[in-house]
Amino acid sequence: MKDIPFERISEKTGVPAERLETSFKKGSSRLLESGGLRALLFKKQVMDLEAGTVAYLTGEPEVIRGFPKIRRTLLLSPAIEKHFTESVAVEEKMNGYNVRIASVSGRILALTRGGHVCPFTTEKAKELMDLQEFFRDHGDLVICGEMIGRDNPYVSHDYPEVGPLGFRVFDIREKNTNTPLPVMDKRRILESYELPAVRLFGIFPVEEAPGRVAEIIRMLGADGREGVVMKDPEMKLPPLKYTSSQAHAREIAYAFNYPFDFGRPFFFSRVIREGFQAYELDESDEETLERAHRLGEAIIYPMLKRIKSIAEGEPACEDTVIDVEDRERAEEFLRHLSRLGVSATIADYRDGKATIRRFYQSTTDRITNYLEGGLY
């Protein structure tokens, strides 16, 4: 512990060194090799230092702050009027996984929300975008975005305009402080380096924003898309997120494929969102019935299918096909999943395509137990 530069990390983050030391002693942070570099990973929040923060310890410490949790609104009108002051920037929230990309000691690394460098994401981000010039000019900035597409190994969703795999930037933040660039400054800098940004629907006066967001959500839901993030244009206030009914149903259906591997709060929170959204959007009886059918089908059909498959002797698992340079890259990704506690294997590999099979053991074991007469 003596060789960890807590004082230097404190100077960069504003968190007292003694609090950083205490965090380490309690196991809330730990040393690891991250992207081939020695680093301190904060698994839990320490004062204002977000969970998922990584302090790289190569020479002068470089701190990549964790991405802040975005709060959700259940009702648009009162929340927007209470939270924002003059105007609201509305950007698309896309269905993928959160990634921070930064240059550390000359290496471009892609970190997942938990603060782990994902070898697959790091490689694909550099293939999808020309990042060298951006980080040559802005080594003090961190690109925050969403890895999306149907060949996404974490959250697969088909966006027709993206193809198999893509990336969309939603924030640019400063290293050490996590201060975000204002919305239009961010978009100008991304355009200048030809880096892809999430869609901006517009910047609306606060009094107009609830109605405009409701319209946008209906449109996104009809297209099978996720939702929006509402931001103060100057990024002085924390953003808020709001998602479509179709997104809720899709997530519930996915989770009920593996009902004993997802916690009850996962299901409950999405059902609560549906109730408040149905209330605020002032739906017709027919629209509410459609919502109810969508929600019920998202629960029953996936779970029934899973019970039947396990009754026939098939384990609860999920296959994802990823593009890799060779089998070693696929095995490297598998080792990354293992470090995260994910049970998976390479089910097949041929011609640069690796089928990663992830196992959901709790669902397999508990459904098997109940099928054999176990009590709930």
Image (spheres, rainbow, N blue to C red):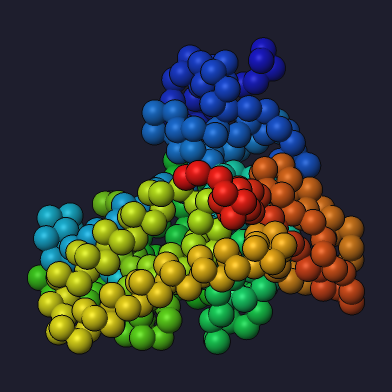
* x, y percent for residue 163: 62, 83
- Total labels: the figure holds 0
Res 306 → quadrant: bottom right
| Residue occupying image coordinates x 57% and y 64% | 307
Residue occupying the point 82% across, 64% down? 347
Seen at 36% across and 81% down, the residue is: 220
Q: Is residue 58 found left or right of 302 in the rendered image?
A: right
Say which quarter of the image contains residue 311: bottom right
Whole-percent x, y for residue 342 in the image: 68, 48
Give 229 or 333, whichever is nearer the viewer.
333
313 or 165, nearer to the observer: 313
The reply, left or right, for residue 57 in relation to residue 183 is right
Q: Position of residue 335 (x, y in %)?
A: 79, 48
Place of residue 195 in the rendered image (x, y in percent of width and height, measured from the top left):
56, 72
Q: Quadrant of residue 321?
A: bottom right
**Does residue 175 lie above or below 98 as drawn?**
above
Does residue 312 appear to the left or right of 191 in the view shown?
Answer: right
